[in-house]
Every structure is written in C-alpha cells, then in structure tokens.
Amino acid sequence: MPEAAIEILTNNHFEVVRGRMASTTSLIEEAKGVDAIILNTTPVDATVFAALPTLKLVARFGVGYDNIDLDAATKAGVTVTNTPGANATSVAELTLTLILNLLTLTPRYNQALKSQDNSLIADAPFGLELAHKTVGLIGYGHIAQEVEERLHAFNAKILIANRTKREFKYGEYVSLTRLVAESDIISIHVPDTPDTHQLVNADLLKQMKPTAYIVNTARGGVIDESALVKALQSGEIAGAGLDVFATEPLPLASQLRDLPNTIITPHIGARTTEAAMNMATMAVEEVIRVLSGRKPTAQVN
C-alpha cells in the first residue's frame, strides 16, 4: 500500500492497522477487531468471517477476487469490492512486453552477452516482427481492450473470442476454434472460473500452429500447465510468456523454469508505481464509502 493512500485514510480519521496477512491464519490474527480489510491474494474463507465478527468490508487490492469466498462473505454480511481497470495499463504493457520478447528473442541475446556465450547468438534463429501477425485475445475486459489498442499501433491483425458478441474497436469477433487455429500469438484475458479453468488444455494446444506462442497475464488456472509443458517440450507450439501460474509462487521444481522457449515472470503485471497507486486509491475510497454508510462502486458479491 503506497503511503499516500494510507494518508487518505488517516486524514479521514480512520485508524490503520498494518499486517503482512501472508496466510489465512495470520490474517485472522492481525485483523482482530477491524471493520475493513484491504488485501491482495490472501485466501479469505468462512473461517475468516467467523473469526472476525466486526468485519464489514473486504476491499480487494486488485481486479481478481477468486481468493475470496463470496458466498461465505454474503452469508456473513460482509461486502467485497475490487478495483476494476486500475491495473489495466500496467498488465497490458506487460502483455506486449512478453509478446515482443518472445518474437525478438531479446532475453536470449541478453543472456548471451552477459554470460559471454557467443553460441547463444550464433545458433539463434532470426526473430520475428509483430507487424502483420495475427493475435488472438481470449476475453475482452479492461486489460484486453488496452492490449487491443497497442496491438493496433503495431499493425497486427486482432481476433477476439469473448463470451458475448459486442462492438470491438479494432478486433474481429470470432469463435474460439477459429482464433486458436489462425493466431500467431494467443493472449489470455479471462478469470479462472469453473467455465474457464484449464480452458487451455492438451486438445486446444494441438489446434494451435506449431509456430504460435501463448501469453498469459490473467490467471494461471486457465492453463493446464502439465499439458503446456509437454507442448513446449515437443515443439507442438513455439513458446510461452507467463506471468501467472497454477501455484504461486512458482514451485522450484516446475519444469517451466527450465524450458528455453518460455519467458516467465513472478506475477508482476500490476507491479508498477502507477497501478499500485490506482488500486490503493480505489480500495481506500471503497473503505471510506462503506464505513460511512454509503454504497460501494465496485461490489462483487
């Protein structure tokens, strides 16, 4: 939480209790007697609501809220909010960063020069341009719309598979089957729900071009990681850029760490100064609204 956001609370005469909230257990210990909690990915379930009877609000510091049991929150009379759109620019820029790094092989050349291993340069294939490539966006929320804007600036062809048909600024609405078959890069922008969990599985990966890449800055559970590893090892697809994983932090034993055709980052999509301030300000404003008896603007339960 940026200090400037905390000052908004203290200036409005709220007492702020700081905690690491690294687990459900520590959350319960650190939040006794509080009226509202602002948190990121700490699991919040029925045991939390039972242990914190004074709790009125859980303000999610971010967009996703799959770590919060919404049914349990509703039964306990606790409001849950998030910060839609607050990190859209940051995550969209990371998405483009991963796409460009995959195409241009920039990380490989960086490693070659720093390790003084000229074979990494001599043996490297030529990179690719993003211009005129077909990029498929699965989902069309705030982040995907920001990605669409940036892809248009690169003169890419944009295909969009979304749950509902709607107007797109630059992209073409297509079926998921067509998107997977035609895309040179697939970028995931859907939450991890029962409908989307492991949406990217062995069957879908087989339908991709062998020259295609997949990028995920949404939620790790949308991809079947074991199937993805096999596809990357066998050359069934060309590569992957991943900021999110089924288990986070990414286990040390994960095979994704050892594959030469992956670029992996530790869930840093919203880890910019601007995104942190946007999310913190929105979360703090929800605290002030709810604890002042007003309706929140981004309630999710």
Image (cartoon, rainbow, N blue to C red):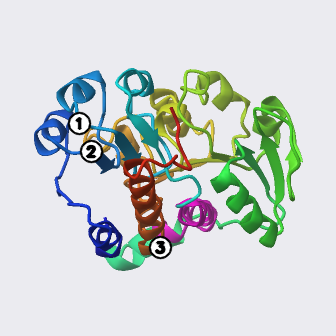
**Tag 3 residue:** 274
Position of 70 relative to 86 (above/below): above
* Cβ atoms at labels 2 and 1 below 8 Å apart: yes
Identified at 10% across, 39% down, the residue is 29
At label 3, counting other C-alpha atoms closer than 10 Å, the crowd grade (few under 14, some 14-19, many 20 or more) is some
Tell me how many marks there are.
3
Instruction: Judge from the rendering whether residue 168 lies leftward or rightward of residue 117; answer left or right.
Output: right
Which residue is situated farthest in the front direction here?
293
Q: Residue at x 43, y 70 (%)?
A: 277
Q: Between residue 37 and residue 269, name the one nearer to us.
A: 37
| Disc 1: which residue | 54
Side of 142 where 165 appears, left or right: right
Looking at the rendered image, the quarter that the N terminus falls into is: bottom left
Of residue 183 and residue 175, the one placed in the foreground of this image is 175
Amino acid beneath label 1: Thr
In magenta stretch: residue 98: yes
Magenta highlight on residue 292? no
Residue 147 image-quadrant placement = bottom right
Residue type, numbered disc 3: Glu
